């Protein structure tokens, strides 16, 4: 099975639990505004094309390498790739499955993602099942360890961003951060176009039920990376992702 997985172009990449909020988008990394600028530069340099399936893509995907010992490990950030929404949802398959279980995404959407994985990798659904099971086992093992983050080539930019935030916070004690002067609320990345009917400017955010979210889902929700909305055009509740 491992030999088959070596040939997968599109893979499930589950983040160890203790590293859920250790990313460039968070205020432990670059913060939102600097992250958006970085993603824009990557798109400007490499084009708005998914690194994996070559379709249109706008999501910045952090590629990590894990160096492990028995009880500790170091997560090294290698690069930022641009991926499409479908490859992104497969990378984060654990979250995608939880969203299905919570009724936030449909069975049709989930089935489409399975087909997308098989098409990109030219494999059967059984390969996905085996890959998902092995990825879950690795995730459980890694989630028990203590982790150190190595930002790699992004280290100097992260250090500069952290220093700037500390300086800004000292001067503006009543605000949350330099990147989000107003406390970031769920939905602040919500797209203007309805993902179901395509109407523009018709979406109104809906508060999601936090009781049904995993820790990772809630972190992404608080960062405004996904949410629910009501479309005034098609009169339906829709799920969206940034």
Image (spheres, helix red, strand yellow):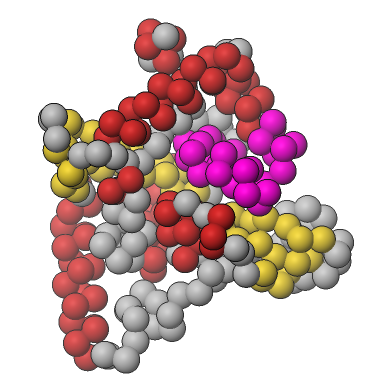
Give the total number of marks visible in the rendering.
Answer: 0
Among the 4 quarters of the image, the one containing residue 241: bottom right
Q: Quadrant of the C terminus?
A: bottom right
At x 61% / y 64%, what residue is drawn?
Answer: 208
Most distant residue in the right direction: 234
- The stretch of residues the image draws in magenta is 83-112
In front here: 153 or 144? 144
* Residue 90, x across and y down, in percent: 53, 35
* Residue 121, x across and y down, in percent: 54, 18
Would you place residue 13 above or below residue 82 in this image?
A: above
Q: Quadrant of the N terminus?
A: top left
Along the horizontal axis of the image, is 17 left or right of 232?
Answer: left
Would you place residue 67 above or below residue 239 in this image?
A: above
Query: Is 108 covered by the magenta stretch?
Result: yes
At x 25% / y 39%, what residue is drawn?
Answer: 144
Query: Is 2 covered by the magenta stretch?
Result: no
Q: Is residue 190 visible?
A: no
In front here: 118 or 209? 209
At x 61% / y 17%, what residue is drawn?
Answer: 125
Most distant residue in the front direction: 211
* Residue 147, x across and y down, in percent: 19, 44
Among the 4 quarters of the image, the one containing residue 40: bottom left
Among the 4 quarters of the image, the one containing residue 136: top left
* Residue 191, x across and y down, in percent: 64, 63
In front here: 128 or 150? 128
Q: Is residue 168 visible?
A: yes
The main secondary structure of the magenta stretch is helix
Along the horizontal axis of the image, is 18 left or right of 86?
Answer: left
At x 18% / y 82%, what residue is drawn?
Answer: 167
Would you place residue 33 above or below residue 44 in this image?
A: below
């Amino acid at each position: 099975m491992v030999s088959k997985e070596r040939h997968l172009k599109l893979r499930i990449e589950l983040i160890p639990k203790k590293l859920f909020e250790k990313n460039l988008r968070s205020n432990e990394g670059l913060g939102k505004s600097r992250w958006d600028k970085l993603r824009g530069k990557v798109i400007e340099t490499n084009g708005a094309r998914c690194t994996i399936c070559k379709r249109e893509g706008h999501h910045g995907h952090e590629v990590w390498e894990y160096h492990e010992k028995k009880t500790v490990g170091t997560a090294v950030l290698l690069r930022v790739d641009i991926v499409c929404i479908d490859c992104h949802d497969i990378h984060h398959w654990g979250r995608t499955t939880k969203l299905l279980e919570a009724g936030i995404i449909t069975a049709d959407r989930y089935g489409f993602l399975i087909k997308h994985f098989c098409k990109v990798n030219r494999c059967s659904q059984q390969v996905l099942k085996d890959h998902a099971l092995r990825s879950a086992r690795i995730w459980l093992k890694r989630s028990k360890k203590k982790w150190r983050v190595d930002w790699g080539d992004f280290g100097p930019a992260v250090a500069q961003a952290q220093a700037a935030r500390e300086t800004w916070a000292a001067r503006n004690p009543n605000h949350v951060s330099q990147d989000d002067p107003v406390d970031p609320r769920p939905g602040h990345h919500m797209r203007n176009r309805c993902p179901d009917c395509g109407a523009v400017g018709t979406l109104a955010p809906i508060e999601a039920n936090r009781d049904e979210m995993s820790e990772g889902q809630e972190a992404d929700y608080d960062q405004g990376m996904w949410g629910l909305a009501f479309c005034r055009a098609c009169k339906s509740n829709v799920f969206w992702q940034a």
